[in-house]
Image (cartoon, grey):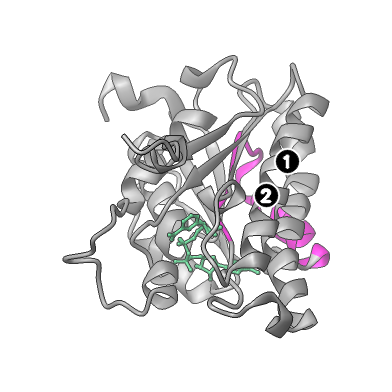
Amino acid sequence: MSSASADLDGAVVLVTGAAGGIGAAVARRAADRGATPVLLDRDGAGAQDQADALSTGRGTPAVAITADVADEASVRSAVATALRRLGRIDAVAHCAGISGPVGSPLEQVLLADWQRVFAVNATGAYLTLKHTLAALRRSSRGAAVLVASDSAFVAAPGMVPYCASKAAVVQLARALSVETAGEVRVNAVCPSVVDTPMSRGDLDRGDFTGADYPVHRPEDIAEHVLFLVSPAAVGVHGTALAVDFGYSARSAFPA
Ligand SMILES: NC(=O)c1ccc[n+]([C@@H]2O[C@H](COP(=O)([O-])OP(=O)(O)OC[C@H]3O[C@@H](n4cnc5c(N)ncnc54)[C@H](O)[C@@H]3O)[C@@H](O)[C@H]2O)c1
């Protein structure tokens, strides 16, 4: 570990959605920086596989916990397990999320699908923070990052539930950052397409070779998440970091 990457040395970082995609990359990069990740996912076997592959800071093994972020009892129990095993939580990276129906016009979106998207993406963020905030407040470097999406700000047709849920996640981060100012920094990261199982499924692609749009690597998004939870981001509260190759900055002016 280089000194430049030691900013998370010894920290306990709870990562939701850590069995794959962005969450798994966050857990890997956190371990590279000397942190001990807690990998929480409804796919417990996948989280355990990721944890087994990590060598963590100070030799403390990563912890994998099976939990559904949309279920309060499950989140409460997972956080209690993490605290029992590791004694504290210094940072939270909430990466668990689902796309819901992709390509369905709103009139065809089933209420159950709408509710599930909000349950995982928005309620999941609320429950994860609700049950980790006390521990984050006890930490001298308490910070949380919610992985939202550029879909909080811009939209493609056929993804209304997802876009609305991600806008809720951004405002959750902003509102909570006001409430926890001086104790816990809360921010959001808003990427455009990232090469993960989610995007490959949504876009029906085996990979992104030859794509005529830019695609992030999960490792790069992990770096943005870890910057925001690290002490290097002191003073950064309530921001929604757009990571979209500048697409949302483009005006309609024909130049
Ligand atoms: N991939 C993209 O293009 C992209 C772009 C912008 C934002 N995002 C967001 O990034 C986050 C991570 O997405 P990803 O692309 O890595 O997706 P992914 O599907 O590859 O990984 C998501 C992980 O979350 C877990 N998960 C889903 N529902 C859960 C629940 N109820 N409880 C616990 N775990 C649950 C899954 O098991 C999986 O391991 C999501 O919030 C997603 O909306 C993704």
Q: Position of residue 152 (x, y in %)?
A: 61, 49
Vertically, is 33 above or below 158? above
Assign the C terminus to one quadrant of the image: top left
| Label 2: few (<14), some (14–19) or many (≥20) C-alpha neighbours in 10 Å | some
| Label 1: few (<14), some (14–19) or many (≥20) C-alpha neighbours in 10 Å | some
| 12 or 98, nearer to the observer | 98
Specify the farthest residue to the left.
210
For the stretch drawn in magenta, what is the main secondary structure? helix
Q: Secondary structure at mark 1?
A: helix
Residue 242 seen: yes
Q: Position of residue 63 (x, y in %)?
A: 52, 56
Residue 225 seen: no
Q: Position of residue 164 (x, y in %)?
A: 69, 58
Q: Which residue is mark 2?
A: 167
Q: What's drawn in magenta, residue-wise?
A: 72-96
Q: Does the beta carbon of the residue at mark 2 sit less than 8 Å from ligand 1?
A: no
| 79 or 234, nearer to the observer | 234
Q: Residue at x 60, y 14 (%)?
A: 235
Indicate yes or no whether the magenta region holds residue 129: no
Vertically, is 183 above or below 124? above
Specify the farthest residue to the front.
254
Q: Residue at x 37, y 49 (%)?
A: 28
CB under 8 Å between discs 1 and 2:
yes
Under mark 2, the amino acid is: Ala
| 154 or 40, nearer to the observer | 154
Measured Cα–Cα span from mark 1 to mark 2: 6 Å
Q: Which residue is mark 1?
A: 171
